[in-house]
Amino acid sequence: MWRRGFCSTTSSALNKKWDALVIGGGHNGLTAAAYLAQSGLSVAVLERRHLIGGAAITEELIPGFKFSRCSYLQSLLRPSIIRDLELHRHGLKLLKRSPSSFTPCLDGRYLLLGPDAELNHSEISKFSKQDADAYPRYEDQLEKFCKFMDPLIDSSPPEVHQGVSSFNSRLKHKLQKSEFWAHCLHQSVSMGQQGLVDFMDLLLSPASNVLNRWFESEVLKATLATDAVIGTTGNTQTPGSGYVLLHHVMGETDGERGIWSYVEGGMGSVSMAIGNAAKEAGVTILTDSEVSKLMINDSHTVTGVILADGTQVQSSVVLSNATPYKTFMELVPENILPDDFTRAVKHSDYSSATTKINLAVDKLPNFKSCNLNYPEAGPQHMGTIHIGSERMEEIDTACQESMSGLPSKRPVIEMTIPSVLDKTISPPGKHVINLFIQYTPYKPNDGSWEDPAYRESFAQRCFRLIDEYAPGFSSSVIGYDMLAPPDLERIIGLTGGNIFHGAMGLDSLFLMRPVKGWSNYRTPVRGLYLCGSGAHPGGGVMGAPGRNAARVVIDDIKG
């Protein structure tokens, strides 16, 4: 059902020259295509798989159960994109979660957190009155920093001027850079010196340092620390991990900052809505259309792409929604790119310690620490359920085991149960559960992810850990789908299994993303642009890289 309205490769669609081609039908590629088409360009999206969405997909792998197979929550999608593309009209329906977080403890206690300030104060007070009073100030500070970041996210980085161009073009570029930095200066002045010092402290410090300065309760610190390590190979003591704490409040749902939501129909509905908006604007979306190589002429200018079946598709503009590694090391022919650029891309960090398990279950987990006697789903089932992370030291130990080449003995698990709010993705009385799991090395020393017995052993390890908090959970499992790092690479197209298209460390953000000197979506190949999460501002179902890249392309084409 998730292919509805999109078609496989057709000769009539490929026998014309397009104003622009987009490699990959992930949410960023679709977003870029929609904006390009709205500007009057003819655009085709070429998607390798049989369905669009990239990592934001819904697949019915077990009859009756629809899994958000990779990404599983929505909050980061830019509000301006939702408005510009009228995504609600195109079927996007967000289901707000409240409470948004539940951390059960083996000692019988638990912590609920969410958008309700009174609930937060009451819950945190069970562990520390001091922390309960500090928590609103912590959230206020993060929100202030996010407001500072918003213009950076929605703008193309002020990169150094590239290539030969006219005087007017160079002048326009200088004015845009001056305007950008003037805005940053204004924002910095309004934040004040102390605010800037606090912001730099957050950017550069390990999350553990930041949280230890704010709070004393171990369970609160550990719950918040999971935001800092999600999708990374680092731990709470990794320098710069404090920056990712901003994700706690960076996103929003329907104007409410820091609210994460489920999407009715699963995350594939996000991609479907963007795809529908793109189609309405005139975009042609082709599935089962894998690109094997870019066509580049002697003057290092792109002329189109070659599909896996040998078909050539002509265009003088190509946007790649693939990872930087896939784009530059595999799709661009050899001896085209500058050596320093090639080395930078090749040696970027694409490592992953993430595994995703999607489950069909016949009943909700019953957490022994939180017996609230609800007949169906209770508040403990609504949000993200943190398993195996009651102390930051547990997160760090799990990470260290992975760094040694072994999957964590007690993995850090984020459990979500979208079917408690979304009644369209599972049969009545049954549920879909997502497990986002860390830490799992790409190539474990004690086995292989290609070995079914090894995979089953690790899955059962995760289920047994959940059993400690919700006895009987393992027996409720009807079936499951598991994506270890190599699966994320092979199936979804994520190099190394990295969900962000490359690490989000401080050396890989803003003017440094994907590599120094090429942060504004342009590349050393004239007419080739990067529009995926490997470009600024990075990963997550955000849409900003696609929208920003489209604006740069439009500016280059139309002057």
Image: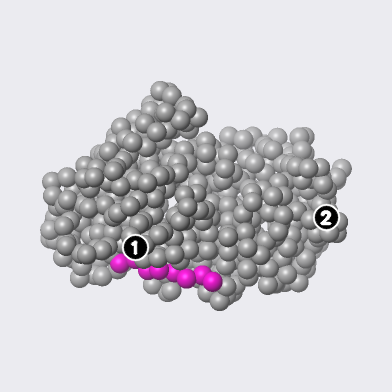
The secondary structure type at the circle numbered 1 is helix
Q: Which corner quadrant of the image does residue 453 belong to?
A: top left
Q: Give the crowd class for mark 2: few <14, some 14-19, many >=20 residues within 10 Å.
A: few
Percent position (x, y) of residue 244?
Answer: 40, 52
Percent position (x, y) of residue 354?
Answer: 43, 41
**Separation (CA) of disc 2 from disc 1:** 44 Å
The image shows residue 339, relative to residue 96, as above or below, that is above
Amino acid marked by disc 1: Val
The secondary structure type at the circle numbered 2 is helix
Magenta segment boundaries in residue numbering: 91-98
Name the residue: 44% across, 64% down. 424
Q: Which corner quadrant of the image does residue 248 belong to?
A: bottom left
Lower sequence index among marks 2 and 1: 2
Name the residue: 56% across, 45% down. 492
Amino acid marked by disc 2: Ser
Q: Which residue bears the numbered disc 1?
A: 420
Question: Between residues 501 and 477, which one lies in front from this camera angle?
Answer: 477
Viewport quadrant of the C terminus: bottom right
Question: Between residues 453 and 325, which one lies in front from this camera angle?
Answer: 453
Viewport quadrant of the N terminus: bottom right
Name the residue: 20% across, 56% down. 111
Residue 11 is labelled as 2
Percent position (x, y) of residue 20?
Answer: 76, 59
Name the residue: 16% across, 57% down. 371
- Residue 166 visible in the picture: yes
Magenta-drawn stretch, dominant element (helix, strand or loop): loop
Percent position (x, y) of residue 323?
Answer: 61, 45
Q: Residue furthest top?
A: 446
